[in-house]
Amino acid sequence: MTGSSRSLTKKIPGYLLHKPSGRARVRIDGKDHYLGPYGSEESRIEYGRLISQHAAGIPVDPFKTSGPEDTGLTVNELTLAYKRHADVHYQKNGKPTSEIHCINQAMRPLLEFYGGSPVDEFGPLALKVVRAKMVDLKWVRRGINKAIGRIRSIFRWGVANELVEPSTLQKLEAVAPLLEGRTTAKDNPPRTGVSDENVAAVQADVSELVKDLIDLQRLTGARSGELVSLTTAMIDRSGPVWVATITDHKTVHHGHARVITIGPKAQLVLAKYLSANPGKPLFDICRTAYCRAITRSCERLKITRWVPHQLRHTYARTVREIFGPEHAQSGLGHSSMDMTEHYAKLGLQKSAEVAMKIG
């Protein structure tokens, strides 16, 4: 194991305040290094430099600076410009998507360590320091890998807009993702379906609206967000299997189609909510409130906590057992191949088969 690898497995030395002098300091290998006025940009830059040096196994020299030639765009300025872009790009129906929150979360440790650093001096070791901070914060491994990918996306956008040198991005892309079993970053257990007993217990405890939404998810495999966005106009009721076409789903920007097939059992539930106003949402609840109603019920009942998305796993397991994986893929709206016209028709047929038998 190299010195660099050893240092990155340790906890990152913190950015600290020396109260008597008001200066920032960092303790590395038992020795305090003073960085300048606490909270100042220059102290943050020096902190990032010393941390990178330490992570690389290079002896720390607090008096060595990068020199007056260090001018140009800083990481702070790049992320601010990217944030303006992201606030416009990641929109759906005039509202920011969840990606905005994920980007902001990924930026925090980046800016904490390297906000004042020149963008073209931010290299692989600095990226590993940011990643090590995420490990210290107990982020899960997959989440860390995605966050590092988002940081690369910031620099990729910078290259596309001639704010960052292409060689800078090329170096960052050399940092491999954290692998399962080869890192101290934790892995969440895989999410599974919900037992019939726990579903029944919650349904007996919640409102009729929430109870019916649970039934619809179990019978159709739909996402909770898809169900709460349904309107009467979106549902074709001309055949024995109703077909709801979702116009606002998570992969619409990739050109994917998404339909929900609604069999006889689900039709009986849904019929209670059909409205004379074709554009009015059928369910007077948002996705977050629906999820919260279930998790709070679990807490009251003192049973294993579960969330609506797990009902899709329950649905998938049932469909796989009866029909096989291709039918499960069609019902869930997953697409591992191009959504050609042929595949779209084939997927609808399989999903309708499922709906007639179990939905």
Image (spheres, rainbow, N blue to C red):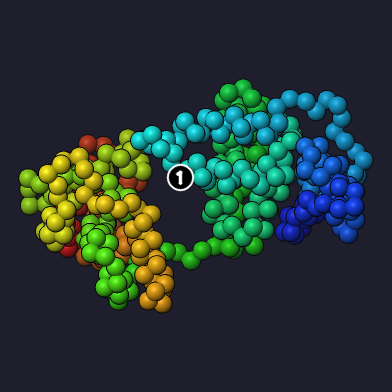
Say above or below: 154 vs 355: above
Instruction: Name the spot of residue 260 as percent of width and height, x first.
Output: 22, 49
Pick out the residue farthest to the top.
Answer: 162
Pick out the residue farthest to the right.
Answer: 63
Judged left or right of residue 298, residue 142 is right
Q: Residue at x 53, y 54 (%)?
A: 142
**Quarter the C terminus occupies:** bottom left
Instruction: Name the spot of residue 322 as percent of width and height, x first.
Output: 21, 65
Q: Which residue is mark 1?
A: 98
Q: Residue at x 79, y 39 (%)?
A: 40
Quick check: can you spot residue 156?
Answer: no
Judged left or right of residue 74, residue 278 is left
Amino acid type, callout 1? Ser
Quick check: can you spot residue 147?
Answer: yes
168, 161: nearer the viewer: 161
Q: Residue at x 80, y 28 (%)?
A: 70
Quadrant in the picture for residue 2: bottom right
Judged left or right of residue 190, residue 294 is left
**Quarter the N terminus occupies:** bottom right
Quadrant in the picture for residue 325: bottom left
Q: Secondary structure at mark 1?
A: helix
Judged left or right of residue 182, residue 126 is right
186, 46: nearer the viewer: 46
Say above or below: 122 vs 268: above
Instruction: Name the spot of residue 31 as percent of width and height, x first.
Output: 90, 56
Say above or below: 300 vs 98: below
Instruction: Name the spot of residue 343 as percent of width and height, x first.
Output: 24, 42
Bin the neighbour count of mark 1 within 10 Å (Cα to Cα): few under 14, some 14-19, many 20 and up. few
